[in-house]
Image (cartoon, grey):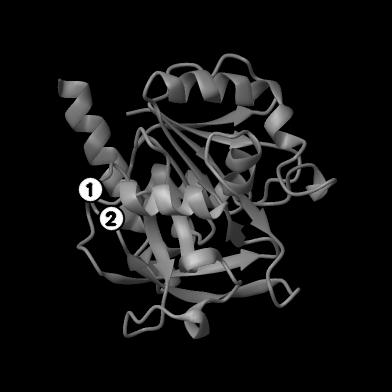
Amino acid sequence: MNWGVLLFPGSNCAEDCFHVIDKVLGKPVTYLWHKDTDLGDVDAIIIPGGFSYGDHLRPGAIAHLSPAMSAVKEFAEKGGLVIGICNGFQILTEARMLPGSLLQNRGLKFLCQDQTLKVDNIETPFTSEYKTDDVLVFPIAHNEGNYYAKPETIAEMEQNGQVLFRYCNPEGEISDVTNPNGSINNIAGIINRTGNVVGMMPHPERSSDNVLGLSDGKGVFISMLKYLEANKQN
């Protein structure tokens, strides 16, 4: 299974994602440059966090116009797995590959902390390693992580099981008190209707190696790997 990590000027989490695929999963991985129009023979693409183009205009607003994103869209339209983490999530919403927008945190402050999440849907290529209602710990580090979409869009997403993770407390309770950034319905991660593109603000790559003291995030990448292996055989 070949993985690609997409780099933009200002990406600062790409090395972490590369490490997880290379050292934790032990799978081939390469960097993809934002000017690339040919992504090569990759089976999954990670759009990492950071501050693409310095977050000028707004996070992801310039990055989604990069030549590589046209290739990413084509890749996703053919069923390829794409996951955008933090700024990657913002880029995917700007590219309209995922619904909604990421607004400034309601406290108007940058958040950097370990955060508990509740797994909402395990029937996806990104979450099959978890159990429903599992409580996980992933770090968050963002200033614009307040997820918003129109009420009718949210209702449709909820009905379709497009919410994968929600912010909660260590007991798994979901409420406004357990919501760090004001995200509607405590949404921390979502998937598209076709089930192959995911965006999430928390960082699973920073929770995937025991040396860091956190390993809950490894399940995201193992889920993807198992899906890819199963479909490669078919």
Relative to 88, does residue 35 appear above or below in the rendering? above
Instruction: Give the residue at x 57% y 19%.
Output: 71
Choose between 133 and 157: the one closer to the eye: 157
Q: Quadrant of the N terminus?
A: top left
Instruction: Give the residue at x 70% y 65%.
Output: 143
The disc at residue 141 is none
Residue 14 can be seen, yes or no = no
User: Which amino acid lies under the numbered mark 2 shown in the image of this protein?
Assistant: Asn
Q: CA distance from mark 2 to mark 1?
A: 6 Å
Q: Quadrant of the C terminus?
A: top left
Q: Are marks 2 and 1 in contact (CB under 8 Å)?
A: yes
Relative to 27, does residue 187 appear above or below in the rendering? below
Q: Which residue is mark 2?
A: 121
Give the number of marks.
Answer: 2
User: Which amino acid lies under the numbered mark 1 shown in the image of this protein?
Assistant: Glu
Position of residue 172 measured from the top left corner of the image (x, y, whole percent): 32, 79
Position of residue 104 measured from the top left corner of the image (x, y, whole percent): 72, 63
Dot 1: few (<14), some (14–19), or many (≥20) neighbours within 10 Å?
A: some
Local secondary structure at mark 1: loop
Relative to 111, does residue 201 appear above or below in the rendering? above
Q: Quadrant of residue 173?
A: bottom left
Dot 2: few (<14), some (14–19), or many (≥20) neighbours within 10 Å?
A: many
Position of residue 132 measured from the top left corner of the image (x, y, whole percent): 21, 63
Q: Seen from this angle, which residue lies furthest front? A: 152
Q: For this view, does 11 lie left or right of residue 74?
A: right
Instruction: Give the residue at x 32% y 46%.
Output: 160
Residue 175 can be seen, yes or no = yes
Q: Which residue is mark 1?
A: 123
Local secondary structure at mark 2: loop
